[in-house]
Amino acid sequence: MPFKIDSREQMAVSIAGKTEQVITLTAQEIRRACAGELLAGAAQTPVTRVCTDTRASLSECLFVAIRGEHFDGNEFAGEALLKGATGVAAESGAARRLVAELALAGEGSAVTAAPVVIAVPETGRALKQIASLVAARSHAQVIGITGSTGKTSTKDILSCLLKPQLNVVASRASFNNEVGVPLTLLAITNDTQVAVVEMGMQSRGEIAGLCSIVAPQIAVITNIGPAHLEYAGSLENIARGKAEIARRLPPGGGLVLPFGDHLLQQFLEGLNVRRITFGFDQAADIHPAGPARLENGRLCCTIACLGEELDVCFNFDARHQLLNAMAAIGAYRLLGLPLAGVAAAGRDVCLPSMRGETLSLPGGGILINDCYNANPMSMNAALEHLAAASNGRRSVAVLGDMAELGPRSRQLHRQVGAAAAALGIDCLVAIGELAAGFIEGARGAGALGKLHYFTDREAAISGVRELIRPGDAVLVKGSRCMRLEQLSGLLTAGGKEGGKTSSRRESR
C-alpha cells in the first residue's frame, strides 16, 4: 500500500495505488537519512506508511513524533505502538524512555510485535529527511509553486490540467510549510509522474529550506506582494525570498514568473533556466489574446501561449484567477504537454472553498466567499471582482483585518479602503481592530456609499445581516485569524444567530 500521512490537525494525504507501486523504505535507511540510532527492532523492517497522528489508523505505519504549536508528538509514542504502529521515530529522550518501558513490560506488554524505535535529533527534521528520501527514490518531475497570493489556486488549476494525462500528486489544501511539504512528498509512489508542491514563506530562507527537500525541476512564482511584511520586513525581502525557489533550480530547469516584475527580476540574474512569463500584457509569453467573457458562470478567453492560441473556458468567474490559470499553463507547457489538452481540463477546474467561490444568498443575491486569507494584493483583486460581479446589484464589501503586515499595516488598510471607494463599492463593512483603516481610507477617498464598522467577528455576526438587502452582491474577505467563514455561513443559510450586542459605528 502507498504512503499515507496523518497529522494532529486531522489532515491526511493518500494516493490510491497497487502494492508494487509503493516506495518502501527500511528502518535502517530511515535511521541513516535521519542521522538517528536504531534502539529496537530489525534494521530491515519495511516501512510503507508514515503517520504523525495517533487518532488515525496506525496499522503498519512508522509514527514520527513531531512537535506542533499545541502538542508534542513525543508524548504519544507509546500510544502509537499500542494502537498498532510498527515503529516510532522520536527524539532521543522519549525514544530511550519508550525502549525502557517496553523492556519493563516484557511479555505482558500490549505491544505484541517487536517494534522499531529510532532515536532522532529532531523529529520535524526527521520528517523532512524521510520525505526527501521518498522523493529521491521516485522518477517524478517536481513542480514547486510559491508567491504572495494565488499559490493554492494555481496548484489546484495545474493539477486539474495534468490529471487527464499524468499520474499526479499535489499538495492538499494549503500544505505549504515545513510540515505540509514533507507530507505531500510522502504521498509519492513509484508510478507518480508529477508532484505539484505548494511552498509558502514568512521570511527569507524558508523557501530555500523547503527546496532542499523538494528539489523542484520547475518553479512557478505567482506574484510578489505585501504579504507577511511583519516577518519579511520589506517588499524587496519578499521578492528575494520568493526568488530562492528559482535559484534552487537545476541548470536548464523551468521557471514561470509574472511578466514585468522588476523587483523580482533583480534576484534572477544569471540563472541558467528556461523562463516563461505570464500576464495581461501582450508582451508576456502567455497572455489573453482578447477580452475575457462570462458564459454560464465560466470565464472564457482566448489564450496566447508561446506562439499558439487556444480558446478555453474555466470553471471560475473571477478575472484575477485568469492570472493563476496562465501561470499553471506555463508549468504545463514546460512539461512538454500539448496546449490542446488545456481546453477540456479547464472546464473541470475546481478551486478550493473560501477562495472566491460564488454562493447564492436568500433573496436572490450572491456572496463571494473569499475568506480563507487576505493581504493588500488579494484584497484589491477581490474588490475588483466584486465590482464586476455586481452587474447592477448593490455591492457590499465585508472586510476583516489583514494580519502580519507590520508597521505599514494601518497605511495598507487605508489603501484598500481607498480602492473600495474608487471602485464605487456601495457599502463597506469593516471588522476588527486593524480594519478601522478601511473606513479611514474609504472616507478619505470620498466614498459615496455607506460605511460600517464592527469591533470583532462576534459583533459583526449580530449586525451584518441587517445591512444586507435582497439581491445584493456581497464579498466576505479577511485574514485566516478572522475566521469570517462563520459569517459567510450565516449569510448563505439565512439563519439567525445570537452574539454580542452589536458594536457598530456608521458614517454617512
Image: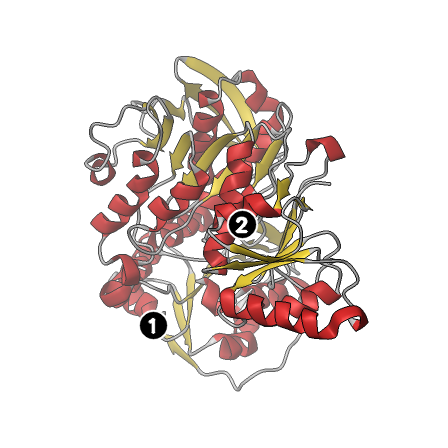
Q: Which mark is residue 231?
A: none
- Residue lying at 34% horizontally and 64% vertically, measured from the top left: 404
Task: Name the side, left or right, on which 2 lies relative to 264.
Answer: right
- Residue lying at 55% horizontally and 62% vertically, measured from the top left: 90
Residue type of the residue flagged with mark 2: Arg
**Residue 330: % across, % down:** 43, 26
- Residue lying at 45% horizontally and 60% vertically, measured from the top left: 121
**Residue 308: % across, % down:** 44, 13
Q: Quadrant of residue 192?
A: top right
- Residue lying at 20% horizontally and 30% vertically, measured from the top left: 269
Task: Name the side, left or right, on which 233 lies relative to 363.
Answer: left
| Dot 1: element | helix
Q: Going from the N terminus, do you reach mark 2 or mark 1 first?
A: 2
| Residue 38 vs residue 438, the one in the foreground | 38
| Residue that label 2 marks | 31
Residue type of the residue flagged with mark 1: Ala
**Residue 11: % across, % down:** 62, 56
| Dot 2: element | helix
| Residue that label 1 marks | 436
**View extreme (bottom): residue:** 501
Q: Nearer the viewer, mark 2 or mark 1?
A: 2
Q: Residues within 10 Å of mark 1 (few under 14, many from 20)?
A: many
The correct choice, above or below, for 344 with respect to 102 in the image is above
The correct choice, above or below, for 427 with respect to 157 in the image is below
Cα distance in 3D space between marks 2 and 1: 53 Å
Give the number of marks.
2
| Residue 305 vs residue 461, the one in the foreground | 305
**Quadrant for the C terminus in the image:** bottom left
- Whether residue 67 appears in this view of the structure is no
**Quadrant for the N terminus in the image:** top right
